[in-house]
Amino acid sequence: MIEAFFSNIYAILGTVLLACFGGYIAWRNGHKARIAIACITFRSDVLGALSGLYPIPVNWPDSGGAVNHMLAAAFPALQRAVAEFRDVLPRRKRRGFDKAWHAYRAGSDNASATQQGHYYQYMGYHEPGTSDASGHTKSKGLFHTNVQNLLNFANET
């Protein structure tokens, strides 16, 4: 038995290496498929939760309070989608994704995002009680940019 092993060592090693390579290719294809499905699901969840507001704001309300209520209502679905998608991302992209999620929720400044329900950056105000000179146009643009920054992480497909 040992003589047969040593006389065919190159054939045996070649077979083992070929099997390892085939296993790696199968794993890699499965991994890419799981990432593609996660990206499609994330995009679908975000676009479903923000329908009418993104990508074209056809249902953008006139008052800032109504924008706040619409986004607060969409928050639980978005939070679930973000939490599920974050686990799929490679570790090197998670920090950027967390920053994009924070910018969506609380703005790009260092405002605290621990309390939900106050999306002042999209209400047409610089700060609570201060009117924005350009109206909702600036708010819509900022909202579009922040959502696009989140969705950019789902461009793996």
Image (cartoon, rainbow, N blue to C red):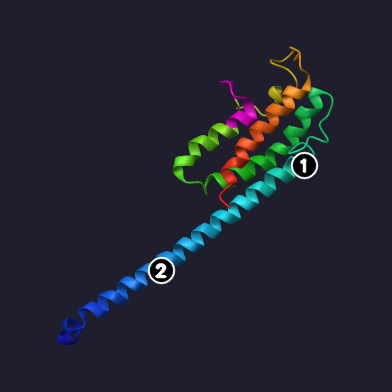
| 131 in relation to 49, above or below | above
Q: Residue at x 60, y 29 (%)?
A: 103
Q: Secondary structure at mark 1?
A: loop
Name the quadrant containing residue 7: bottom left
* Among the two numbered marks 1 and 2 on one chain, the one whose residue lies closer to the N terminus: 2
Mark pair 1, 2: CA separation: 42 Å
Q: Position of residue 106 (x, y in %)?
A: 63, 26
Q: Is residue 30 visible?
A: yes
Q: Is residue 47 magenta?
A: no
Q: Position of residue 157 (x, y in %)?
A: 58, 53
Please give left or right for residue 46 compared with residue 12 in the image. Answer: right
Q: Please provide the residue range marked out in magenta.
A: 102-112
Q: Position of residue 57 (x, y in %)?
A: 79, 34
Please give left or right for residue 18 compared with residue 43 in the image. Answer: left
Q: Is residue 106 magenta?
A: yes
Circle number at residue 51: 1
Q: Residue at x 55, y 57 (%)?
A: 34
Q: What residue type is disc 1 on? A: Ser
Q: What residue type is disc 2 on? A: Gly
How many badges with numbers are in the image?
Answer: 2
Q: Residue at x 73, y 33 (%)?
A: 72
Circle number at residue 23: 2
